[in-house]
Image (spheres, rainbow, N blue to C red):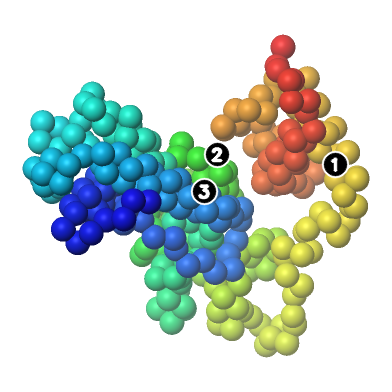
Amino acid sequence: MPEMTKADPSAELIEAALGEVALWARPVSFQSVGPAFPEVYDRFEAERAALRDKLARRLALLSLEELRSIPFASDAPRLNPLFDPQGRFAELFHEIDDLKVRLPQDFLGAWAIAGKQIDLDYWSAFRSVTLEQAVFLSLGRDPREASYDIICQSYGRSEEADEVLLFLEDRYELIANAMGCDPVAPEAQINLTDFHAWIEEVAICVDPAFRATLRTRFAAPEDSGRILAPVSEALDQKQVLDQRERNSMAKLLTAIAIDAYGYDPDASRSKLPKEIEGICALLGLEVTTDTVRKYLRLGKQFLPKDWKPE
């Protein structure tokens, strides 16, 4: 990157043009639940650094007088060419705009992050919580630091983020169904005693700190010394199938999904995993949407690179 002196306004112009992209900071993530893609943060940081360098090189072609004539605090295209989508820096404007649209959500690395993890002392005193609160507590995010509706409005920033959002929606529907709540009435109350009993009964994977808090408060005396194997390990298919068998199952499921149900592996969202879960339920077979989606994602990797749906 070209060296910028204290008298050189290029740095201020660049930071002002980047806006929220410049202010974005990678969250500190903790052990959590569900799919996680911290590599998206790596990719975004690399793209931001490359764009900063490109901006610096382009601005270095201007004279100091020209740079000083640009009001960095203004986003008016006629005053600041970095905000003009049709001006001499139009290419840079659109690259900045593209990064702003793809700003990574803070839950991509984990739902439990520094500053937004569950306040266990606060929530352990509750007798009941709302459906939305129960969902975020199960994931390790303090409900006061999240909004289900707002988070679900952030679809489309990346394929990885959409996968995490699909997991969130599945978790929401799962808890609503299990607790007998109307999904469109998120303020309905869920008794924490019942919620804890259900978590232990079905061995669903929830935030470990939240689970420990529930056990301390609600576990029966005879169960207080019982230590359950981590669900994520107990349900891990790698303990049951070797990698070759996993790959074969993934190929088989993907082939059937494409041939019999018209599944499109390249679609950003698909209702098929949910439909397969429903079919299995009617047959008395237990399988989760997340498991189906995981195998379809794995199976997609084995399709020929030049494969296209007929």
Specify few, some or many for label 3: CA neighbours under 10 Å numbering under 14, 14-19, or 20 or more: few
Residue tagged 1:
247
Horizontal side of 141 relative to 92 (left or right) equals right
Quarter of the image that includes the C terminus? top right
Is disc 1 surrounded by few (<14), some (14 to 19) or many (20+) residues within 10 Å?
some
Give the mark nearest the N terminus, 1 or 2: 2
Q: Name the residue under label 3.
A: 43
Name the one closer to the observer, 102 or 173: 102
Residue 233 located left or right of residue 148: right
Question: How far across and how far down the image is residue 217, in percent?
Answer: 55, 82
The reply to whether residue 38 is in sight is: yes
Instruction: Indicate which label's residue lies in the foreground, 2 or 3.
Output: 3
Q: Residue 30: x, y in percent?
A: 54, 69
Q: Is residue 68 left or right of residue 19?
A: left
Q: Could you tell me if the residues under marks 1 and 2 are in contact, i.e. CB atoms within 8 Å?
A: no
- 3D distance between C-alphas at marks 1 and 2: 22 Å
Image quadrant in which you'd find residue 221: bottom right
Which amino acid does the dot numbered 3 rest on? Arg
Type of amino acid under label 1? Asn
Q: Quadrant of residue 274?
A: top right
Whether residue 85 sits left or right of residue 109 in the image: it is left
- Identity of the residue drawn at 57% across and 32% down: 269
